[in-house]
Image (cartoon, rainbow, N blue to C red):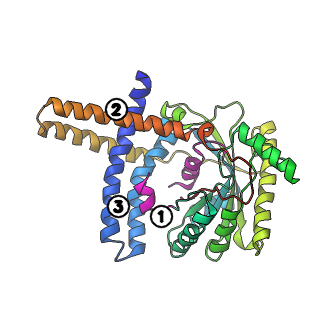
Amino acid sequence: MAIAAAIILPIGLLFLLSGLIINFIQALLFILVRPCSKNMYRRINKEVTELLWLELIWLFDWWANVKVELYTDQETYGLMGKEHALVISNHRSDIDWLVGWVIAQVLGWSMWFSGYISLERSWAKDENTLKSGFQQLNDFHQPFWLAVFVEGTRFTHTKLLAAQEYATSAGLPIPRNVLIPRTKGFVAAVSHLRSFVPAIYNITLAIPKDKPRPTLLRMLRGCSSVVHVRVERRLMHELPEDESGIAQWCKDVFVVKDTLLDRHLVTGTFGDQECQDIGRPKKSLLVVICWSCFLFFSAIKFFEWCPFSWGGVVFCAVFLVLVLVLMQILIVFSKSEKSIAPKVPSPNTLEENLLPA
């Protein structure tokens, strides 16, 4: 417990304190800049938000040294991060979204200020939210990725058994490495975005069988791993026009994805694509060093200014315990085993998560 606290506490403090500062800056931008120019607000907010979220990229790239091996063709690699794209991916672990951030090179209030689309996992409640969110992206000039995890929940053996039971009863191809996609959110995304989003990035994530699966807790402990990512770029205009055709396209993609993962289990690679070296960008390392120095010297000045009192000591102790508890809660709720499994996997149930990256 002492070792875990010694690791988690300083990282938690760094993220919490810097997050509060970033949220305050974002609030000012929202009040002062956004009414004058939405585009200018988005440009500035992107740079400000990166100062917070690059800390997680640092945790992934530098602290835990999780290596991402990216398999894609040279043309797709050259376009990544330079165009709008809708991203669909299998959902293998609790940090799949972070892998997307790493290859894209890029909580709470920070997400809201950045235009994240928050869902309640109920189509009746989420349909209008999705439409409104998609319309706001129409005049988003900076390149964005909108990620849709169409499986609706993270992959576990228990959920796979449930998906196989449903596939058998419904006469569908029986999955082995993925769950059955839920297509309503994907269909809505394609229908609303196809006029200004040129491409879909079909991402397949796999962990080599001789490597441990990366989790948030393992990352905090500095444990390394390897993630293989295959990216296939598909043109949006190639998709069918009708909703049933779009839904079937998505299902077919996951059948192919299942076969790719079968092959990966045998060969340990996505050998049909060229492996691109994305390295470890130094920007996240620089951001963490700057934040650490700023907060350290701010703390020194604070204690120099604030006279010693037992009340202050108690306040600091309670604050540190609160940070530790919050980090433990985050770790527990991020585990795949803790995520909610659907009672009966239904392709018509909306449980996708949509995040602009």
Q: Disc 3 and disc 2: Cα gap in Å?
A: 27 Å
- Residue 54: image x %, image y %? 45, 49
- Mark 3 against mark 2, which lies toward the viewer? 2
Residue 99 forms part of the magenta stretch: yes
- The answer to whether one can see residue 175 in this image is no
Q: Disc 1 and disc 3: Cα gap in Å?
A: 12 Å
Q: Counting residues from the N terminus, which is met first, the one under dot 2 or under dot 1?
A: 1
Residue that numbered label 1 is attached to: 115
Residue 218 horizontal side relative to residue 162, left or right: left
Closer-to-camera residue (104/135): 135
- Name which residue lies at 54% across and 72% down: 132
Amino acid under label 1?
A: Gly
Residue 334 horizontal side relative to residue 199, left or right: left
Q: Residues within 10 Å of mark 1 (few under 14, many from 20)?
A: some
Compared to residue 238, the image places residue 287 above or below, namely above
Disc number placed over residue 321 in the picture, else none = 2
- The answer to whether one can see residue 232 in this image is yes
- Residue 162: image x %, image y %? 76, 43
Amino acid under label 2?
A: Val
Q: Residues within 10 Å of mark 2 (few under 14, many from 20)?
A: some
- Mark 2 against mark 1, which lies toward the viewer? 2
Q: Which residues are magenta?
A: 92-116
- Residue 220: image x %, image y %? 48, 34
Disc 3 to disc 2: CB gap under 8 Å: no
- Name which residue lies at 42% across and 68% down: 42
Residue that numbered label 3 is attached to: 26
Disc 2 to disc 1: CB gap under 8 Å: no
- Name which residue lies at 33% across and 71% down: 33
Q: Disc 2 and disc 1: Cα gap in Å?
A: 32 Å
**Helix, strand or loop at mark 1:** loop
Residue 55 forms part of the magenta stretch: no
**Helix, strand or loop at mark 2:** helix
